[in-house]
């Protein structure tokens, strides 16, 4: 997809309606700076905005992504091109999504990790001073906690990396 061409087309469509960037932004619920970024080709509008613009301008999303009004024949050809481009230019690979959500989960759950480590230390210390039953408890926590921690993290990661659908 040619971002500059799309941006120029979006600017042309807006001007045909006689709207300023601010007026269009108000209709779409975004700032005039966001509209400007789209029109300069710096960013592609998200799907929700493409749908709204499609309705506002009476065009298809395919025409917006093609950066031009299309005939029926052109429409079919551009649809295939746009789908191939969108699929090949995905913002993140699956592994990047997984890595991102792992880091996010670990950051959000530091307290649970530290608490688990603290419990193990306390149980081992209690075993030294009092009874071997604390050693057994410490070993059980040491064996089970990492598995629980990893399973909880991976459930979170998989739900988000696959958008809750089981597919990337």
Image: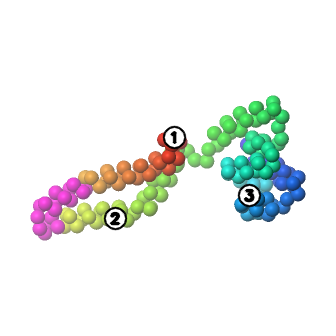
Question: Where is 111 relative to 43, above or below?
Answer: below
Classify mark 2: helix, strand or loop: helix
Colour basis: rainbow
Residue that label 2 marks: 114
Question: Where is 90 relative to 128, above or below?
Answer: above
Nearer to us of marks 1 and 2 is 1
62 or 124: nearer the viewer:
62
Tell me where residue 6 appears, x and y as whole percent.
Answer: 78, 47
User: In the displayed structure, does residue 106 sit left or right of residue 121?
Assistant: right
Tell me where residue 148 appears, x and y as whole percent.
Answer: 32, 52
Q: What stretch is highlighted in magenta?
A: 126-142
Instruction: Report, in whole angstroms, how far the alpha carbon at label 3 lies from the one at label 2.
Output: 45 Å
- Magenta segment includes 30: no
Residue that label 3 marks: 28
Residue that appears at 55% across and 44% down: 93
Residue that appears at 81% across and 32% down: 72
Residue that label 1 marks: 167
């Amino acid at each position: 997809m040619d971002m500059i061409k799309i941006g120029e087309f979006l600017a042309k469509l807006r001007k045909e309606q006689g709207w300023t960037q601010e007026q269009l932004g108000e209709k779409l619920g975004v700032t005039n700076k966001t509209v400007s970024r789209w029109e300069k080709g710096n960013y592609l509008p998200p799907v929700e905005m493409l749908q709204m613009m499609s309705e506002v301008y009476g065009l298809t999303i395919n025409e917006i992504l093609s950066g031009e009004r299309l005939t029926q024949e052109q429409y079919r050809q551009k649809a295939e091109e746009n789908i191939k481009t969108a699929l090949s230019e995905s913002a993140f690979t699956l592994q990047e999504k997984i890595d991102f959500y792992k880091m996010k989960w670990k950051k959000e759950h530091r307290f649970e990790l530290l608490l688990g480590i603290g419990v193990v230390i306390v149980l081992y210390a209690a075993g030294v001073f009092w009874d071997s039953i604390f050693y057994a408890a410490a070993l059980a926590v040491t064996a089970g906690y990492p598995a629980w921690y990893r399973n909880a993290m991976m459930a979170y990661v998989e739900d988000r990396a696959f958008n809750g659908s089981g597919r990337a």
